[in-house]
Amino acid sequence: MKCLSLSFLTNFLIMNYLFAQYQPVIVIHGGAGTIRKADMPPEKEKEVHEALAKALRIGYQTLENGGTSLDAVEQTIIFLENHPLFNAGVGSVLNNKAQPELDASIMNGATLEAGAVAGVSRIKQPISAAKLVMQKSPHVFMIGKGAEQFAKEQGLEMVKPNYFITPEQINQLKKLQKRLKDQKKNQKASLSPNQEIGKFGTVGCVALDKAGNLAAGTSTGGMINKRYGRVGDAPIIGAGTYADNNSCAVSATGHGEYFIRANVAFRIAALKTMQNLSLQQAAQQALDLVQKLGGSGGVIALDREGNIAMPFNTDGMYRGYIDKNKRMETLLYK
Ligand code: ASP
């Protein structure tokens, strides 16, 4: 009798697990920084809202159709990489040699599998390369020419580095380099590039699918005027990206060096489970550490219950979500 009821219970649990339907949720960011309403031309504000809304709809559609959170994250980020408004793919900021060097990563919260690429400039969609590293190679992280060769072998579309460069980014870099030169001449203490420009612009996405699986992804051109060869937090699993079904999915944006040192994405996941904090508390605590170290930026985080956290310590952060009640919102400022 006991045995019978036990097997009934096991079957019940397995069926429940197999057919459990979660309400899909998607959250995105398009970078943090000195984003103030007072400085924002209305047309640009509209353009950003529209781009964020379109990105959300792309990812949400995938989830609604029963697609995986991984696919939703990839599809959403592909759209943002192709949009010149964001610091990822086309429109990426340039390094100190006026070249694009792109970083991206993705993580599967169901299996803790992850993939990343860094310092690439010929792969049209770096986020897809990160996903292929995860799914089609025995590795997690590939860089530079080796990553590009792998992406090409996997059939990804390849482009010339010029493809990513926009006139706006050339201007930004020239202006910044001139300012830094002038400051040096006047022997003024130089500001860090992000303080100078005041904007990041990396893109990220976290999603929950109907099967209850979380995923996270981040893609970026890095920091403007970064030294050739510099890698930020975006492609580093645990710093810029992390996903674990047992905790949460996180994507970060900000001054990468601080996010690496504070291991922000993993820290949020660890704080949530190990210290039993709410998602909001865990995300805020990790960001407080970044601030204490002298860094700025923000994160988006999502758990299996559909809780969303989007804290930042800058003036603004491009962000948006479609929550478990299908409510959509896109936001720019505090
Ligand atoms: N976190 C990125 C980096 O340091 C920059 C950004 O978020 O825009 O490379």
Image: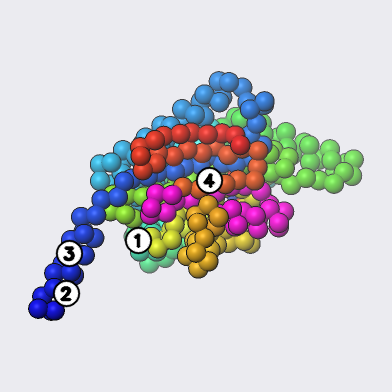
Q: Please, what secondary structure does the residue beneath circle 2 have?
A: helix
Which residue is at 65% across, 31% downward?
36
Say which element carries label 3. Answer: helix
Q: How crowded is mark 1: few (under 14 residues within 10 Å), some or many (20 or more)?
A: some
Q: Is residue 118 visible?
A: no
Q: What is the CA distance from the residue labelled 4 to the residue labelled 2?
A: 43 Å
Specify whether 315 is left or right of 123: right
Give the mark nearest the N terminus, 1 or 4.
1
Q: Cβ of disc 4 within 8 Å of ligand 1?
A: no
Q: Residue placed farthest to the right in the image?
A: 186
Where residue 110 is drawn, which disc sits there?
1
Quadrant location of the N terminus in the rendered image: bottom left
* Residue type at numbered disc 4: Met
**Residue identified by numbered label 2:** 6
Residue at 65% in and 42% down: 314
Decide which of tag 3 and tag 4 comes sooner along the chain: 3
